[in-house]
Amino acid sequence: MDKISVRFLPDNLIANVEHGTSLLLAAASVGLELKSNCGGDGTCGRCLVKVQEGRPNVKSEGSISLKAKQSGLVLACQAAAVENLVVDIPQESRLDEHQVLLEEKDILVEKDDFLAAGYSLNPLCRKIKLTLSEPSLTENISDFSRLQSAIRNEIDCHDVRIGLSMLKGLAEVLRTGDWRVTVTVAQLNGCAEIINVESGHTDKPAYGLAVDIGTTTVAAYLLDLESGVTLCQKGTYNKQSTYGDDVITRMIHASVPKGLRELHTAIILTINQLIVELLSQSDISSDDIHLAMVAGNTTMTHLFLELTPRYIRLEPYIPLASFVPLVKAEELGLKINPAAQVACFPSVASYVGGDIVSGALITNMAKREEITLLIDIGTNGEMVLGNEDWLISVSCSAGPAFEGGGITFGMRAMKGAIEHVSIDPETFEVEVTTIGNVKATGICGSGLIDCLAKFHRAGIIDRAGKLQADINTSRMRQGDDGWEFVLVWSDEADSADIVVTENDIKNLMRAKGAVYAGIRSMLKAVQLEEEMIDKVLIAGGFGNYINIRDAVAIGLFPDLPPEKYTFIGNSSVKGARLALLSQEAYSEAQELGKKITYLELSNGNDFMDEFVSALFLPHTDMSLFPSLAANND
Amino acid sequence: MDKISVRFLPDNLIANVEHGTSLLLAAASVGLELKSNCGGDGTCGRCLVKVQEGRPNVKSEGSISLKAKQSGLVLACQAAAVENLVVDIPQESRLDEHQVLLEEKDILVEKDDFLAAGYSLNPLCRKIKLTLSEPSLTENISDFSRLQSAIRNEIDCHDVRIGLSMLKGLAEVLRTGDWRVTVTVAQLNGCAEIINVESGHTDKPAYGLAVDIGTTTVAAYLLDLESGVTLCQKGTYNKQSTYGDDVITRMIHASVPKGLRELHTAIILTINQLIVELLSQSDISSDDIHLAMVAGNTTMTHLFLELTPRYIRLEPYIPLASFVPLVKAEELGLKINPAAQVACFPSVASYVGGDIVSGALITNMAKREEITLLIDIGTNGEMVLGNEDWLISVSCSAGPAFEGGGITFGMRAMKGAIEHVSIDPETFEVEVTTIGNVKATGICGSGLIDCLAKFHRAGIIDRAGKLQADINTSRMRQGDDGWEFVLVWSDEADSADIVVTENDIKNLMRAKGAVYAGIRSMLKAVQLEEEMIDKVLIAGGFGNYINIRDAVAIGLFPDLPPEKYTFIGNSSVKGARLALLSQEAYSEAQELGKKITYLELSNGNDFMDEFVSALFLPHTDMSLFPSLAANND
């Protein structure tokens, strides 16, 4: 059947798609990403578009507001192209790149390098300038043997390998340069692999790419592997979002026909786009990137390599591979040097992935005597606890509440998101600050933590999280879903009244309870108490905004002195960078993948008891939160 | 431009070719191989065809006999298809498969296995039946880690690797077989590579392919790697012959545009055809072959891998690679399991290749105290001398005389070739025996050695190889090129009178002189005398026919007692088989590639002096041939 043309306005981009393709996928096919949390199920109501010409086949209205419907909008995921169309995508429906904060409050990239001290620069890939002896009748070993022995003189390795296609060109390259060559060599696992051979001595260093594949966002660093300098950092949304917002939805999509291929293609496209951006401000070409190091959660790593995540989702939750093979860039379609090696951080288990191993690496926690707790909160709360002698990890399904999911006015940490809240306990008047200091459009994770803490402190909710209907303020009112508290009135907001409902609070309580119960389960497993933790490191974008006092006040984090807490930003991409720059670090990452044990929380231990106990503010057992007990009582 | 159709008779095969393609290549494109020694230069005059319909563009007459011309024949290499043609290929012009002797006197395959004693069966590739523990919440390592550890329980290796494409299917394969799997593992260089994973326990063993790529013929063995049994052996001509008969012509062809690709494709097609034949009598599929071991001279190995042999030909004669990387069958287009590993024997130098290393392996010469001389004579005489402490090798350009090249009635050891000659020293009457006991059509190597020895003994030639015009027989006569001796009169031959010319004798003298000078040069380099050689092993098809006494009498081989000589047949393919069946042997082959030193004969040593001294029968220095001196004087 002939393809159908869908022209998207105002971009004027034309997608040529199969009959029946949804407008959401059609838009994605030309690089236009729409907001979507539900993976095209029609339930989140965010991918609104207006069809200007032609008529799509609308499968169902989906969760669309009356107002949107009256404005002639449809959900892109529910509208299939069955004839040529012209479709307008309103600004509000776009997952705009510019909303990914990369400057003022950078959720993707970090500048502080206080971590990972003690490693010296010994990159996984380097260029070596060699002047080979010219062959003669008495010195007539083969070209490749000649090159191998020259490389062995420069670096320590048990084997020097070359791929057949690289070998094919070697004779001419050596002779063109009159036996002077510049060889790009990757050293992983004790073996040197020749990635490239250039005639003559060239001055360009080898470049490396460090990538963190998050479920929501993807961050990449471009590194000069000779100097160790990070040349550029870029972040963007994971294009897989078109197929669902969270890991579980993606895994489900991976099991439909072509789904795995689509998710794989989406992440490769995402990274390729980042590569273009990273290179756009330099004279470096994509072929100059000779090594990529990728850290991501287990599912993301699977999808990156097009490995099925099917059994990650099903009990007993088994990844296809934790230690994945080295692959060549061309096998994946990654737009760097086709012969470049691509290495992925090992995973510990299905829900403790390479991103956490990367974080553990950069914290040096496996090299310290003191006990470190590493916390990375996204949809799952993933945590590692331990020191040089032992390391234990858990993953708890915190749910997407801290990322804005399942919360009426929840949103990611973007411009317009409420990040801090203060409430007068007498008048219940509210002051909020938003990211970008613009009118509020919703509430992000740090704002939600603030809400819970401040609501409790002002008596708006009780210890069980129940809204106190009897308090004297017009902000407390009955909404469609029961009682709700108005945080921002519509006249000060870039939307309707921004409210927090009792259901929102319940979701938040479950999220914070799961994280704390996970921490408690780990402590119990190793028979330690909270106060024995010497250091708590909060990783991830989420961590940068939150108020530690509030997070402790709601019982999300253990009641430890604030000075024990440190935010470490995107530790995943930083660990990937470290592994690129240090062979020692790369080896340690492999070791960490084996060394970190995994505590399965669904496995008949005390997690459920701990979880139920944690569904109070801060906890049923106040003795666990002595500083709060002292203050409040 | 439209393709041109050339129909070949009597086969009735149609080649659709580009305008201007030679009839030689057109025939090759549909699998019809014509005799050709010169690689399409028009100088050997063998690729005669008769154009029945249409008119080709004949570039030059080339070296065509008047008689052939009068019969309306043209040289296929000189005739280009510029319109549709019908072309008849006479039987005489065909390189007929059936002429490759595989039965009575088998030049390609051998049955005696007295060599290679002392190795136990420990194949490079095997199938392992595994029953994995089923994963659970408490035993939740990844699928791949589970498989790796089960394999490690069975075999000793420092790493278990898998390719990305194989990994992709692993999850389903494991579960389909309910955690019972049969894994095909190749173990080379201490690392186990997973070649295949099958659900359940299968009984089919892993199969292997041992290949000897000769310049002229290619031999292949199909092996059951579990039992070590050779299931089938096949041999055929190297399809590269279309592009030239000898290594040098092929190397020249490799340097023209597309030439390297053509030569590579030709050898792959040759091997693929052998594979089809090997499998045709069995229920084994090509996918069941999981490992191929290839031995060939350095140029053949280069062409097999599509590596340029350009610098092998030019001084100082440098191969691109002596130790070539392992490659996957699919990279080469070899029709076995696409993931099968393909290993090549290492070469020592440009003119001492993997076939010689393979021969040295199977002789066990590097493990014996006694001194062995291994001789392999083709176009080059390649020899290895040594014992457990040292090994030295040479290659001398013997020229193609012993293969029938450059000899008026020279031919390969095919049906109709004169293989033995006896001459009455009184009457000069000649008796010949031919291969297949048919009318003689030419003389092959063993017959030529016989001629030289018997001519000398009968006084037909003097010690310098000069025909004695004054002897009293009508067989001695003046031909177009000077004096010639009629070996077989036309009425007893399947051709005109079969003669040996003075020029033929000169070429034979040069060939035998080069081989002997090579042996002398090695001996001198290690300061040994002939009599210190304990054992002489004659490898290759050529060796099977020759009379050792005659070979010594003409000064081709050293004057040692006949019991020191042993024919070992195609030692190259046997060594390849051994390496497939024994990891120890494979490792030793790698070591041999390093251990055998190479003596470059063009390198200012005494080779030229030795060569000139050897241009007599048997030699200028009769003290080197004491047994002959005793008999003759």
Image: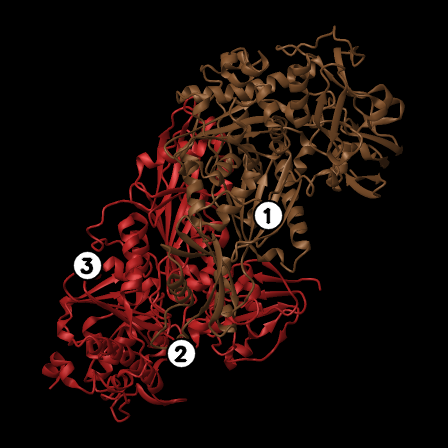
Chain colours: A red, B brown
Provide the chain ID for the residue under circle 1.
Answer: B
State the CA–CA distance, disc 2 to disc 1: 80 Å
Dot 2 or dot 3, earlier in sequence? 3
- A352 over B626 or under it: above or below: below
Which residue lies at the image location 53% right of the left edge and 36% below the top edge?
Answer: B355
Disc 2 target residue: A496
Provide the chain ID for the residue under circle 3.
Answer: A
State the CA–CA distance, disc 2 to disc 3: 51 Å
Label drawn at residue B221: 1
- Which of the 4 image quarters holds residue B549? top right
Q: Nearer the viewer, residue B71 or B376?
A: B376
Q: Amino acid at mark 3?
A: Lys
| Residue A288 seen in render | no
SS type, badge 2:
loop
Which residue lies at the image location 59% right of the left edge and 20% below the top edge?
Answer: B553
Q: Residues within 10 Å of mark 3 (few under 14, many from 20)?
A: few
| Residue A391 seen in render | yes
Q: Amino acid at mark 1?
A: Tyr
Provide the chain ID for the residue under circle 2.
Answer: A
Drawn side of residue B158 relative to residue A169, left or right: left
Whether callout 2 and callout 3 share a subunit is answered yes
SS type, badge 1:
strand
Q: Closer to the observer: label 2 or label 3?
A: 3
SS type, badge 3:
helix
Residue A223 percent coordinates (x, y): 34, 46
Disc 3 target residue: A367
Which residue lies at the image location 28% right of the left edge and 44% below the top edge?
Answer: A122
- A178 over A568 or under it: above or below: above
Q: Amino acid at mark 2?
A: Ala
